[in-house]
Amino acid sequence: MSENKIIERIKEQFGSIVIDNHDFRGDQTVTVKKTCGNEFFKFLRDDPELAFNFLMDITAVDYFSKKDERFEVVYHFYSLNHNHRLRVKIPVSLEDCIADSITLLWKTANWYEREIWDMYGIKFRNHPNLRRILLYEEFKGHPLRKDYPITKRQPLIGPLN
Amino acid sequence: MSVTEQGLLERDKDTMTLNMGPQHPSTHGVFRVILEMDGEIVKTAEPEIGYLHTGIEKNCENKRYIHVIPMTDRLDYLNPPGNNLAFCLTTEKLLGVEIPERAQSLRVIMCELARIASHLVWLGTHALDIGAMTVFLYCWREREMVLDLNEEVSGVRMMTSYIRVGGVAKDATRPWLDGIRDFIDYFPAKVDEYELLLTNNPIWIDRTQGIGVLSREEAIDWSLSGPALRASGVNWDIRKSHPYSGYEKYSFDVPVYQGGDIYDRYRVRIEEMRQSREIVKQAIEKLPAGDYKTPDNKVSLPPRETLDTSMEALIHHFKLVSEGISVPKGEAYVPIEGPRGEVGFYIVSDGTNIPYRVKLRAPSFMAIPGIWELTYLASQEYSCPT
């Protein structure tokens, strides 16, 4: 399946939730509404023409005042069978700072979603264990947000016991 | 309540909670596992990984592109050229610049030498942990040769920062090329020597074969990459599937084993060292003449001698030194095959000289939750013989 057909295939099935798409420098990218739900991701994984069985990465970007919806959760998928890649982006607003967890579909998502919660404060619905992963539980704020100053320091605390 | 909150040692149950690590940062693998033990059997293992978190991504968002390169070295001190390369390839993808063939070959040589050095550290420490001191010393001996080669070409043994946006930092030197030729002649016999010590060694086999088995399905499910994936029977190497920096020009094999256990992961890495040596050999033999960096003066500095005669070169020089590279607006992700698997950078640019967002996709971040399950599986089948 040629690469530019990936987005056509997604639009065929889920046309109503696709907000935007582009292939800047050959990276197939699709932006979908937050309400896409697990059926959309299940389709990406199980559809034989797409077959994205590898979840390479999940991250987030804080657009602060640059976009209406402040955050974007960014997924990178890879298909071993077809050797193609896809980037999926989901806008998330500060007021409703929660997205759906895809841990049930890709185990890999577990730690990535914890990392995003840790760094950006975006929650994931139905995540089995949404705790901080790199920082300690008592840390205040989410350091990769653009309004967290780079010079800010917090005292390290010892173990609870 | 987590295991930590319950205290590190509990005696009111049949099991004992034991704290493994964190080790000192200079030791390999600074990470802590909270183990629940029943005698010598590990019942559960909860990993804690934040000890090496240094906020590099936040730092990258406040530095110019050129200043990010030394930070990428420090992401993984066993594979600085690979991290440099992944960052530079992503930036170059956003910029849309072509890299001269000579620069691409020099990049490949650096990355493959780093792969050899990285696998040597892996093999040495792994064998040391099982009790084979000799292999550790042998591996360090050969790694030292690679580090000396790094020093010759870049001035630094480990944090080379040799690969830059637009090419490499400086051209290959004759002593470096001669040193590599000596190394590729010397190295194969040494790999045979490691194999002589380990491959058929009954203690090694007893402690690695059939231990920590990851099936093909599990490996895919965990989105593993690199040697761990290939030891589970999946033939996937980014150097073959999406060749970058001219890897399609070299003939090399991708070792794949079906066992999925520690022994097969060992065999994959041993064979990869041989194949990396093959790639370096071909790259040295066919090293093209030409520039070692792009002639595009918006990306790399113009030659020093042109500054005296060309006004344009002077302006480019001034702009690059004072402002740095300005990258067009957009986003890109480029993966490369690092020694441990897929290393990728996702960069969002807002059109300025400072990246808006830099995300590193690190292969081991995904391997550890896999290990979490694995240690559990391993402990079910095996306890240390007395």
Image (cartoon, helix red, strand yellow):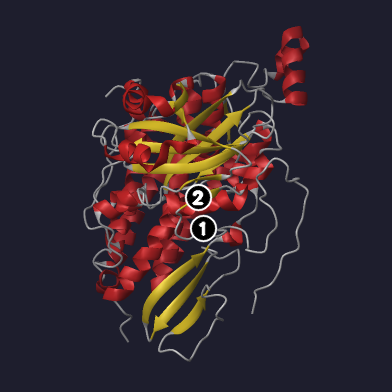
Which numbered circle lies on residue A130?
1
Disc 1 + disc 2, Cβ < 8 Å:
yes
> Circle 2 — which element?
strand
Q: Quadrant of the N terminus of chain A?
A: top left
Q: Chain of mark 2?
A: A
Amino acid type of disc 1? Answer: Leu
Residue B180 is marked as: none
- Which of the 4 quarters of the picture holds residue B53? bottom right
> Looking at the picture, do discs 1 and 2 lie on one chain?
yes
Spot occupied by residue A150 in the image (x, y as percentages of width and height): 74, 46
Is the residue A159 above or below the residue B183 in the image?
Answer: below
Which chain letter goes with mark 1? A
Is residue B354 rendered to the left or right of residue B13?
right
For mark 1, does the 10 Å Cα neighbourhood hold few (<14), some (14 to 19), or many (20 or more) residues? some
Q: Which residue appears at 51% of the width and 29% of the height?
A: B332
Q: Residue at x 67, y 18 (%)?
A: B303
